[in-house]
Amino acid sequence: MTGAASREPAEPRGAAYDGAPPGTIATLPDDRGVYKWWVLTLLTLAYVISMIDRQLPFILAEAIKSDLGLSDAQIGLLGGLLFAAFYSICGIPIARLADIHSRRTVLASAVGFWCVMTAIGGFAANFVQLALSRVGVAIGEAGCTPVAHSLIADYFRANRRATAIAIFSIGGPIGSMLGLLLGGWISDVSSWRAALLWIGLPGLVLSALIMLTLREPERGRLDEKPRHEAPSAARLVDVFRLLWSRKSFRHMAMGCGLYAFGASAKVAFSPMFLMRVHELSPSETGMMLGAVVGVSGIVGTLAGGTLGDLLGKRDRRWYMWLPGISLLVAAPCLAVAFLASDVTVALVALVPSYGLGILFIAPTFAMAQALVPAQMRATASAVLMALMFLIGNSFGPTIVGGLSDLMAPRAGELSLSYALALTAITNVWGFVHYLLAAVHLRADLESVK
């Protein structure tokens, strides 16, 4: 009896709380084992599908524009202010729900919803109907990243978290690449409507897999100071107040928001830029731009997580210095890419502009998780995503599309090139905020302890 008792865990694990059904709580006492990699695979696949569905309208933009009679500003609105506003507004309450109830259920429901809304977009007969379907996609996708980040924090220890978030985040470039390749190919052989329909529906399979195989982990079980009972949920106002008190969080939110301004415009208009300025076909655009986004995005995202964890062991301020430096170096590459008269030069310059730009994701969101207690993590991630979308995605495509229309009478087909090149300025501005975030990071991390 004595020997058996000595092998009992020091604290109870696996008690069903936070709304998860009995038997679904992961009971691993640390982050060893292979199951966490299955969880990370499911989360990454969810992000891949979200980016495919988000990318589709942009590779299909010229066909949609011609069929429905839209302007550049309306295309920018679909991927900019309209999408970002609903993504930002809905992301926080959905994340709040995930901080209180089963994250598995929230994620599975979100995946199923946005996939159905993507497919419905294929039946749109006008701008309003297409816009409403994209609003549905935005609401569903708002439940992906914050919930995934919260789950990752309970399956991977802090010194591995940026790497795990980086692996999850490569779903972004992979999804963008597949969206470009599949969307361009289907558009050439069939129609933009078929592309939305047939790419949207398969995500329902992943929704079922998440619901059936993902186990809900105990919140905060891998923190440096493990809790002996499930942490109670904080009020939403308390989360906002705490985040606002973290000066490093404020500056990192501004930094990634300013990056998102140019990045979202680049995502929305790069396909149109290559087809309009360099006269590539949709399939050629999808293949070439997909390769650029996929390869540079994967390398940049993984580099951000790996280097962040590696350099962060020496000085945690590297989690902020690294994204800032990468944004600064990417700025001139961005300008060259959109002002080059040769398509090869443009594509080559896009590689570092994508790869270096996206490097910010893993270090930034890893620190966002570190700056708050376990019961606030999904909400903190959602707040950061909301600020990023409100600052960047709301205005980037909308302003760039408007500038393109405004300059078109004088600049002609090059108006879109000039509008996109101007986004290099926001990269430099973002660099300044990341430096300021590094100044306050140490003190803010100490206050969490």
Image (cartoon, rainbow, N blue to C red):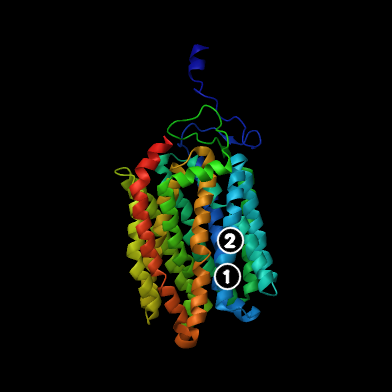
Out of 360 and 294, give the one closest to the viewer.
Answer: 360
What secondary structure is marked by label 1? helix
Q: Position of residue 168 (x, y in %)?
A: 48, 51
Task: Tell me the crowding category of disc 1: few under 14, some 14 to 19, or many 20 or more residues within 10 angstroms, Cα based.
Answer: many
Q: Nearer the viewer, residue 389 or 348?
A: 389
- Image coordinates of residue 436 in percent, x first then y, are 35, 53
In this picture, is 3 found above or below 409?
A: above
Q: Are marks 1 and 2 in contact (CB under 8 Å)?
A: no
Residue 53 seen in the current view: no
In the rendered structure, find residue 77 and report the number of the disc placed on it: 1
Q: Amino acid at mark 2?
A: Ala
Which residue shows up at 46% across the image and 59% down it?
A: 257
Identity of the residue drawn at 42% across and 33% down:
224
Kind of element beneath mark 2: helix
Residue type, label 1: Leu
- Residue 298: percent from the left, percent from the top? 42, 59
- Residue farthest toward the left in the current orientation of the protein: 314
Lower sequence index among marks 1 and 2: 1
Residue 187: mark: none
The circle drawn on residue 85 is 2
Q: Residue furthest top?
A: 1
Image location (x, y in percent) of residue 179:
54, 66
Front in this rendered view, residue 254 or 197? 254
Residue at 66% across, 36% down:
21
Let me know if residue 430 appears in the view.
yes
